[in-house]
């Protein structure tokens, strides 16, 4: 394996690194608690992965990048897992094709759980070496944040899987909802223009694609004070939004036409219910609309006489707000679904509920250089043909998100918790 020579400046959570490791790894298992063994194995589409694969791949990451290079005499749990559970690291070697992960009935779920225990046992020993801990802190922290990304994917992949079942089974029964409030009309908040800095300053953990911090010119603009709701998007649908080409980008109209799209991904044909992780539920008109592609978000914005914000506009607004919202906390208590806005701040729902599409292409910041070695494949090689999303969702771990965080997906994707906030020029 190629060695890692450079990494962004990473800083761990205030708790000890070993405790942090145990907490993150336990959360992945807690996500799987409601599952039957059959639920772990099936892959519902090429973009999704079985829960069993997520559990194994996140363990593979620690084994590949920490245990093999840093533990003398380390014996891998199963050498063939190098091939099965590599995701896209060409520097390391060949991998099992992503669309065929659901065909891996072996190793069994029990084998994968034993694999996790094996990795955890050796990682705890490694983290217990005080003279060595600081040398690996940054890489361990990266691995934990990598696992948190997969925790979000586990929820969205399981939701897609269960939605393919005609019985529309629930991942779990309805969780306690946040306190509802009457939804007021959205208003626009004016924000000044000028030359500002965006990007992470390296004083907290960040991925390499969030740096370097750099200057941007932003004209005066306005942001909607909350996310677009189901009720508002329903107006677009009923106004023939999916039948009028004038609202759509050319690629979007082709996608809508070829896919016979008529509504958001998990909405019922009658437009009165949506599939959730708690099964089919009545459509909450005050909650943020979710599971929209970039094309749908952009078309709605045009219909509404507005636009999508750029990622710089979003970050500058979010940087002045507190990181709070409907994010993933305790797995059993978190709603796992977007909720109506409840804050009283000027800009609401900046974090959590749904990832917010921006109008910005996912590309390198000025002066960006991917880290050397296999870690350099983490983000940089995907900077093509994707769009940036900001703010996190209802299944993003609360201690994983920040103002500079850049998520990215292809414009046709919509199985993630994706929504939008409107922007306007001043």
Image (cartoon, rainbow, N blue to C red):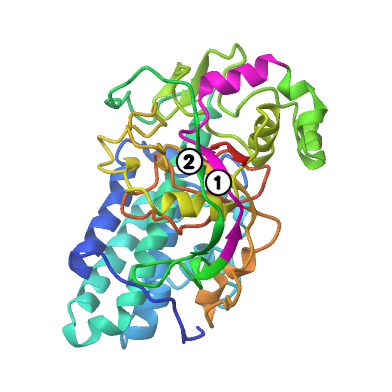
Is residue 108 visible from the viewing direction of this image? no
Q: Secondary structure at mark 2?
A: helix
Please state, as top left, top right, bottom left or bottom right, where the C terminus lies in the image: top right
Question: Residue drawn 23% across and 56% down?
Answer: 23
Q: Is residue 420 one of those drawn in magenta?
A: no
Between discs 1 and 2, the one toward the N terminus: 1
Question: Residue drawn 72% across and 22% down?
Answer: 241
| Magenta residue span | 216-239
Measured along the vertical axis of the image, is residue 290 above or below residue 331? above
Q: Is residue 221 one of those drawn in magenta?
A: yes
Quarter-wise, where is residue 89 in the image?
Answer: bottom right
Estimate the x, y position of residue 9 in percent, counting from the top left. 38, 76
Q: 52 or 242, which is in the foreground?
A: 242
Estimate the x, y position of residue 83 in percent, counting from the top left. 54, 68
Quarter-wise, where is residue 415 in the image?
Answer: top right
Estimate the x, y position of residue 304 in percent, counting from the top left. 65, 27
Q: 235 or 412, which is in the foreground?
A: 235
Direction from residue 43 to residue 25 in the image, left or right? left
Q: Secondary structure at mark 1?
A: loop
Direction from residue 239 to residue 332 in the image, left or right? left
Q: 104 or 158, which is in the foreground?
A: 158
Q: Which residue is mark 1?
A: 48
Measured along the vertical axis of the image, is residue 88 above or below residue 314? below
Q: Badge 2: few (under 14), some or many (20 or more) residues near its Cα, within 10 Å?
A: some
Question: Residue drawn 24% across and 78% down?
Answer: 126
Q: Which residue is mark 2?
A: 156
Residue 5, numbered label: none
Q: 186 or 86, which is in the foreground?
A: 186
Question: Do residues under tags 1 and 2 come within 8 Å of each other at their CB atoms?
Answer: yes
Q: Nearer the viewer, mark 1 or mark 2?
A: 2
């Amino acid at each position: 394996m190629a060695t890692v020579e450079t990494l962004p400046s990473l800083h761990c959570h205030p708790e000890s690194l070993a405790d942090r490791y145990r907490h993150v790894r336990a959360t992945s298992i807690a996500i799987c608690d409601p599952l039957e063994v059959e639920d772990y194995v099936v892959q519902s589409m090429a973009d999704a992965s079985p829960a069993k694969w997520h559990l194994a791949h996140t363990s593979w990451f620690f084994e590949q990048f920490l245990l093999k290079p840093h533990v003398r005499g380390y014996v891998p749990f199963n050498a063939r897992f190098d091939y099965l559970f590599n995701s896209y690291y060409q520097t390391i070697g060949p991998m099992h094709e992503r669309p065929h992960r659901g065909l891996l009935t072996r190793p069994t779920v029990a084998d994968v759980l034993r694999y996790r225990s094996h990795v955890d046992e050796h990682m705890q020993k490694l983290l217990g070496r005080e003279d060595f801990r600081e040398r690996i802190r940054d890489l361990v922290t990266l691995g934990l944040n990598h696992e948190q990304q997969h925790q979000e994917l586990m929820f969205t992949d399981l939701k897609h899987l269960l939605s393919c079942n005609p019985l529309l089974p629930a991942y779990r029964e309805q969780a306690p909802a946040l306190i509802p409030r009457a939804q007021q009309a959205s208003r626009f908040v004016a924000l000044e223009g000028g030359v500002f800095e965006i990007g992470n300053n390296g004083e907290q953990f960040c991925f390499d694609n969030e740096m370097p911090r750099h200057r941007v010119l932003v004209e005066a603009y306005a942001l909607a004070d909350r996310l677009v709701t189901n009720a508002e998007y329903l107006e677009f649908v009923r106004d023939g939004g999916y039948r009028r080409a004038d609202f759509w980008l050319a690629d979007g109209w082709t996608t809508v036409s070829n896919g016979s799209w008529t509504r958001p991904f998990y909405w019922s044909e009658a437009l009165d219910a949506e599939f959730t992780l708690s099964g089919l539920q009545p459509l909450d008109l005050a909650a943020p609309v979710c599971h929209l592609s970039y094309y749908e978000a952009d078309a709605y914005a045009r219909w509404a006489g507005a636009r999508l914000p750029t990622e710089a506009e979003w970050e500058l607004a979010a940087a002045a707000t507190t990181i709070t919202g409907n994010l993933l906390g305790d797995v059993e208590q978190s709603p796992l679904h977007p909720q109506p806005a409840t804050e009283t701040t000027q800009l609401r729902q900046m974090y959590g509920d749904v990832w917010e599409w921006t109008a910005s292409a996912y590309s390198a910041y000025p002066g960006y250089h991917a880290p050397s070695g296999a870690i350099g494949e983490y983000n940089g090689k995907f900077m093509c043909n994707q769009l940036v999303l900001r703010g996190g969702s209802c299944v993003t771990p609360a201690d994983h998100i920040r103002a500079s965080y850049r998520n990215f997906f292809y414009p046709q994707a919509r199985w993630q918790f994706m929504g939008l906030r409107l922007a306007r020029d001043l």
